[in-house]
Amino acid sequence: MQKIRRLSASALAFAFAAAILAGTAAQAQTGAEFFKGKTVTYIVATAPGGGYDTYARLITEYMQKYLPGSTFIVKNVPGAGHIVGANTIYASKADGLTIGTFNTGLIYNQLINADGVKFDLTKMSWVGKAASEPRIFVMGSQSPIKSFQEIVDSKTPVNFTTTGIGSANYVEIAALTNLLKLPIKVLTGYNGNDDQLAIRRGEAAGTMGSRSSFEQFVKNGYGRFIAQIGGKQTDLPQVKDLIKDPKGLTFVALIQSQGDIARLTAGPPGIPADRMAALIAAYKKAMEDPELNAKAEKLTVPIEPAYGDDVLKLIKEALNQPSDVIAVVKNALEAKQ
């Protein structure tokens, strides 16, 4: 009996020691250590091709570099103007192994409590933002329209491409079309580089989007920029200087504020603080990597980053709009196209 008790005591001691060792190992696997041997899925809320995909592949290549032992994969989850992808990120397990990107049009969707929105941007785990993006009006080279005023004066509908309903360029084009009574016909469903192909085919005359996404398109002679919202460039007229409608000016100011928050990276709510710190640190090192910046310059995509809580602050400020601004967005979107 005494021998059995001694064995039991030994077994208990062994179990206790094993538990301590397991706890120590688990404790050691925090922060960057957690990601060793793990795969991080980076969701892009649009189809392959286009600016979001370009940024995603740059970011994941260099975040992987600065989280040694990790593997990053890009997964495209298009649908409903980036809402499907954002919902997917928001609902994913909060272990730090799923992050991703979506467009700032989702700020508009949250402002008006749009159908299908299952996320709260203020609760997401913010890794960073890669750029600031002025919006531009771009026309195909085959289009006779060479100025914003020529759109205003057009006697026939001017076809503009957009992605899904609710995406940034859909919200912005639809709202400005309704507010300013522009003769624009809004065409939806152009994801990735589909909009550029449609313009080259003559299926559409133009569109509105981020300047960097269309820089190469214009350099290749396929189109021309005619007006801009936000940004520091001085080669184009600012839309705010071309219109007088008070509600239109209010909405243009809102668009300009969104341009400061571009190419976002976020995860679901509740990612442990040490893993978030590791993700933010890797993202910051990636954004500051000379090789990444050289590639970005070659791809004509701007890098103007911010990190963590600084991005959350910008998001909260963008969502803190007075009722009249929210009404402008809501009424513009609900107006008949």
Image: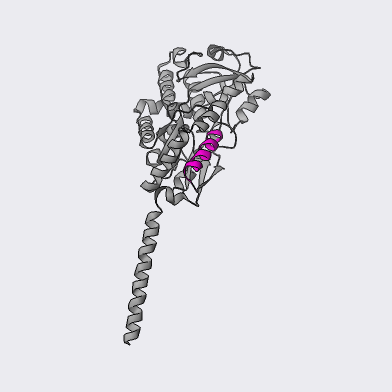
Verify whether residue 63 appears in magenta: yes
Q: Nearer the viewer, residue 209 or 279?
A: 279
The percent position of residue 312, horizontal first and vertical second, equals: 37, 36
Answer whether residue 22 is magenta in the image. Answer: no
In this view, 139 is above or below 317: above
Where on the picture, by quarter, is residue 138?
top right
From this viewpoint, is residue 136 visible?
yes
Residue 103 position within the rendered picture, expressed as x and y whole percent measured from the top left:
49, 33
Query: On the rendered image, what quadrant is the N terminus found in?
Result: bottom left
Horizontal and vertical percent position of residue 16: 34, 69
**Residue at the limit of the structure toward the bottom, as seen here:** 1
Q: How is the image coloured?
A: one colour
Q: From what the image shows, is residue 222 above or below residue 16?
A: above
Query: Measured from the top left, where is residue 212 in percent x and y?
Result: 53, 25
Characterize the magenta stretch by its predominant secondary structure. helix
Q: Residue furthest right?
A: 201
Magenta region: 53-68
Residue displayed at 37% across by 59% down:
24
Residue 164 visible somewhere in the drawing: no
- Identify the residue at horizontal 43%, vertical 13% (top origin): 244
**Camera-nearest residue between 334 and 59:** 59
In the rendered view, tell whether residue 213 sits above or below residue 124: above
Describe residue 43's horizontal placement relative to residue 113 as left or right. right
Label count reads 0
Residue depicted at 40% across the width and 58% down the height: 25
Q: Nearer the viewer, residue 175 or 270?
A: 270
On screen, residue 221 versus residue 78, left or right, reads right
